[in-house]
Amino acid sequence: MADLEQIVSERDGHRAVFNGSWYRGPHTNFIASKEEIEYSAAGVDRWIMHGWSPPQPFIRPDTRLTAFGSCFAGYITKYLMEKGYDVGGGHLSNQSHIIRFGEGMVNSFTILQQFEWAMEGKEFPENLWFSEGKEIASIDPAVRAETRGVILGTDLFIITLGLSEIWYDKRTGDALWRGVPAYLFDEKIHGFRISSHQENLDNLRRICAIIHTAKPNARIIFTVSPIPLMATFRPISCMTANSVSKSILRSAVDEMLRESNDERISYFPSFEIVKDFFVDPFERDNRHPKPEIVDFIMKTFERHFCCP
């Protein structure tokens, strides 16, 4: 069979040529060239947000929303609170762990634990949940009840996934929120491992199932935090370990969205905006996005998900 003639695509005055003998399918979206990227609302909407925007914005000022997961959830909470949205965490008296320590639940296991604990009555051992300040988070029944109340009172969950490297309890297999305080570390009890794509996919399925059992009309927006690992506990470079860690999470979210095809579940590509859209997005620590980048991301989120 003779090859088809070359196809020439004109995009913004730039000429792209590709072989016409390859079937391209019903959807063909090319990567942007350096000349084509425009660092603006129009640019990010074209090259990043395409395919991820909901049909219509659905977050109203009276939508009760809770954002937690990795520390990037803190940016979302702060921005939306300042814009006047009804965000959990504005009520500082709330003792729920997803409010007080929500930015420290950096893996899908610990996020799932909170839903299982509050909504299904699952029990977890002491010394499993630690705050950034090494405070042990209580498994007190009153805190469980308050966490259940937060979940039942939420219309929209914004869940940010941080990493797939986990510390865990060797006796039970349960994941810890973060690392182990040095004064409590016991080699016989505490272990470190890389969680798999399948494990994270299963966790995301369970999170959505628990939420929609309790709140059938609740919306869920998943994000993957663009903030890289500060350090890896693997015997490889941190940069390559971070690539693996984020890839596992991103692929799990994508598969869950594709298989569920549920309009109640969305993805916001904050990870891609930072990693693929901007050339120099981070502060000098090479971890935290610059304030202007965070502001750009939040305005993009607001434009696509929040009602005008």
Image (cartoon, rainbow, N blue to C red):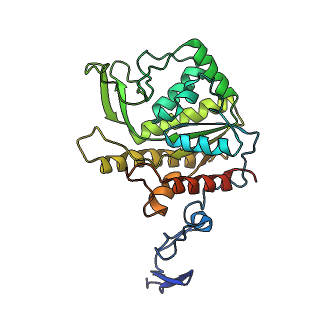
Task: Give the quarter of the image for residue 107.
Answer: top left
Residue at coordinates 55% horizontally, 71% vertically from top-left?
38
Please tell me how many numbered marks the rendered image carries: 0
Q: From what the image shows, is residue 243 above or below residue 5?
A: above
Judge whether residue 105 can be spotted in this image: no
Q: Residue at x 42, y 41 (%)?
A: 163
Closest to the observer: 88 or 242? 88
On-image quarter of the N terminus:
bottom left
- Going by the image, does 161 lie left or right of 186? right
The quadrant of the rendering that contains the C terminus is bottom right
Residue lying farthest to the left in this orientation: 235
Q: Residue at x 30, y 24 (%)?
A: 182
Give whichever of 174, 179 is nearer the camera. 179
- 90 horizontally vs 70: left or right: right
Q: Does residue 156 appear in this view? A: yes
Q: Residue furthest top?
A: 141
**Looking at this view, is 220 or 237 the one in front?**
237
Indicate the position of residue 104 as horizontal and vertical percent values. 47, 33
Q: Where does residue 231 sit, x and y in percent of width and height?
A: 32, 41
Residue 188 lies, in percent from the top left, at: 26, 19
Q: Is residue 64 left or right of residue 114?
A: right
